[in-house]
Amino acid sequence: MNKIRKVIQFHNQGSSKLFISKYLSLSRNTVKKYISMYQFLNLSMNDIAKRSDTELEELLSQERIPLSSNKLQAVYDFFPHMEKELKKTGVTRYSMWQEYYKKYPNGLKSTQFRYYYNLWGKKVNPVMHMNHKAGDKMYIDYAGKTLEYIDKETGEVIEVQFFVAILGASQYTYAEVSLSQKKEDFVASVENALHYFKGVPSAIVPDNLKSAVIKSSRYEPTINETFLDFAEHYGTTILPARAYKPRDKSLVEGAVKILYHRIYAELKEQTFYSLKELNQAVWDKLEKHNNRKLTGRPTSRLQLFNELEKDKLSPLPIERYEMKFFAFATVMLNGHVLLSKDKHYYSVPYQYIKKKVKIVFTNNKVEVYCKYNRIALHPRDFKKYIYTTIKEHMASTHQYMTEWTPQRFIDWGQSIDQSVGLFITNLLEIKQHPEQAYKSCLGVLSSAKKVGNERVINACKRAMEHNIYNYKFIQTMLTTGMDLLSKDDDNENIIIPEHKNIRGKNYYK
């Protein structure tokens, strides 16, 4: 109490808060608190001096200064209007006090006005002190507990993740269940939330989950590349919640707690047999939640959304986001890159041969980038071992190589017989690079001109029986006549040809 008296004394003498803080070894916030309370109580130094330490402590620690019922009712009736207005850009507490004081000239001064507003705010909303502007932020998170459904075919119990998104100003909420928190499911859930809100906020605030943030940082977190691309598509910004800063995500965590009681607890005891069925039950409960009046206020989340936030959101883009995937490759000597996921080859300009490139692909297209510049664009083709080539990409001396493709050899083999086509396909598959198999394929198929189609067919069938796929094996069978032997022939009837490298039985006598 002695320090508090000195704080008030120094303040009346005109000393700065910084000086008082250093002189009395108190934090500046503590000094501000005592001075604010002193101003609020509107006491003189004589009043302070007359009171004992016990009386002064009781005076400074009381939670509410008594007001006349009419004055208190008037200011409390004004606060719901003030809360809505504060969500608008440019509106401050001081400007709202001016509006209040103009309406009630005998009302509270600015210090008392702010004090009672804080008391009212704690009563109706514990996190109200964060002034959320309309259309500014959408907070997203996953609930810690999971829901589940039973697969009808297998009887397996499948756990699913509970996703929640909430708009800051209106507290309008979206929720759904998804199979996982992986990147694909996470982005789909966020996109569904934006379409549920029918608009895009200025920023999305996720917790530091891996699908959103690769590496958290106090100053510059590393955002997941796909999620960042998603944000650019929708024209918004990603602002990850700061680590160890609970207030950054208190709104969505509060929503999760409420939904635990209103959705999770009720659905946990029910049985569902598909993800769609479970989501429909979640959305039915969600509609009731958004139409329910907020604690201590006459409006619901849906009403606040329609009044304050709906028109502040940016419009949705015409098309939904198409998930992008990324791969890296080196341009081969033939001017193509391999998309390993599909085992398909795409051409790039020959100037980039041996360069390292980045491949960005969706379900419909494939883009190739070199040092942030797009050098090629192709429609995506899911056929294996096929080349998609733009002739302009090829140097004139290499354009003839585009005629040699895996499909050409497979079609050639099919024209001889289905078994030959299957042998060629398997021969191409076991090679790390299809062009390694070109000469082998050419050798097998060209043999038909020398020995006839029938013998090549028999040789390919024999080779597949032994699961051997190379040209040398086919050549050996055709040279030795093994392709002409029936399956019932004994090994004794096989005539081993004379050869200088064969020692013979006399060698071992």
Image (cartoon, rainbow, N blue to C red):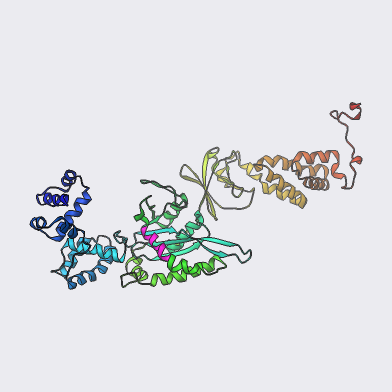
Tell me: residue 277, above or below residue 456. Answer: below
Which stretch is magenta?
Answer: 250-259
* Residue 419 visible to an observer of this rendering: yes
* Residue 315 visible to an observer of this rendering: no
Q: Is residue 251 magenta?
A: yes
Tell which residue pokes out farthest to the left in this image: 46
Image coordinates of residue 509 in percent, x first then y, are 92, 26
Q: Residue at x 75, y 51 (%)?
A: 415
| Prevalent SS, magenta region | helix
Q: Nearer the viewer, residue 290 or 258?
A: 258
Image coordinates of residue 499 in percent, x first then y, are 86, 30
| Tag count | 0
> In the figure, is residue 70 to the left or right of 85?
left
Image coordinates of residue 49 in percent, x first then y, are 10, 55
Image coordinates of residue 111 in percent, x first then y, are 17, 60
Q: Residue at x 15, y 50 (%)?
A: 2
Tell me: residue 484, above or below residue 159. Answer: above
> In the figure, is residue 392 to the left or right of 71?
right
> In the figure, is residue 187 to the left or right of 335?
left
> In the figure, is residue 47 to the left or right of 240?
left
Q: Nearer the viewer, residue 187 or 291?
A: 291
Q: Nearer the viewer, residue 313 or 205?
A: 205
Tell me: residue 465, above or below residue 108. Answer: above
Q: Is residue 108 magenta?
A: no
